[in-house]
Image (spheres, rainbow, N blue to C red):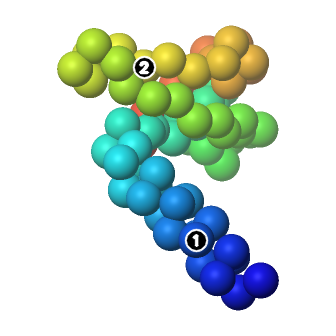
């Protein structure tokens, strides 16, 4: 059992290492740069087109008018 868990961990770690630079945290806020001003939603996205665009789910970006992308 331990070796199976170890293999799964190594597979997950390899996947993380391959994609970590392409993933972004997206936070939304009702006021620019004021997360404490109201409910903030969070989601993730990933970079495409050599980092020029981010793909994410619609529910991540439709909740509030202001977005912040953190890499």
Residue at 68 percent across and 12 percent down: it is 58
Residue 35 spot, x, y in % from top left: 61, 43
| Apparent side of residue 55 relative to residue 41 in the rendered image (left or right) | left
Residue at 37 percent across and 56 percent down: it is 17
Which residue is labeled 1 in the image?
Answer: 7
| Apparent side of residue 29 relative to residue 25 in the rendered image (left or right) | right
Above/below status of 58 relative to 1: above
The C terminus - image quarter: top left
Q: Earlier in the sequence, mark 2 or mark 1?
A: 1
Q: Could you say which quadrant of the image residue 51 lies in?
A: top left
Q: Could you say which quadrant of the image residue 9 lies in?
A: bottom right
Residue 33 spot, x, y in % from top left: 48, 37
Above/below status of 18 relative to 7: above
Residue at the farthest left position: 50
| Closer-to-camera residue (59/40) | 59
Q: Could you say which quadrant of the image residue 21 lies in?
A: top left
Residue at the farthest bottom position: 2
Q: Secondary structure at mark 2?
A: strand
- Whether residue 71 is visible to the viewer of this picture, yes or no, is no
Count of labels in the image: 2
Q: CA distance from mark 2 to mark 1?
A: 31 Å
- Whether residue 1 is visible to the viewer of this picture, yes or no, is yes
Residue at 64 percent across and 35 percent down: it is 43
Residue 1 spot, x, y in % from top left: 77, 83
Residue 64 spot, x, y in % from top left: 68, 20
Rendered image: mark on residue 54: 2
Pointer 1 local density, CA inside 10 Å: few below 14, some 14–19, many at least 20: few
């Amino acid at each position: 059992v331990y070796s199976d868990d170890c293999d799964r961990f190594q597979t997950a770690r390899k996947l993380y290492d391959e994609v970590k630079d392409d993933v972004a945290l997206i936070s939304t806020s009702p006021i620019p740069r004021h997360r404490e001003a109201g409910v903030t939603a969070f989601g993730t996205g990933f970079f495409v087109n050599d980092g020029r665009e981010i793909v994410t789910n619609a529910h991540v970006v439709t909740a509030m008018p202001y977005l912040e992308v953190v890499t």
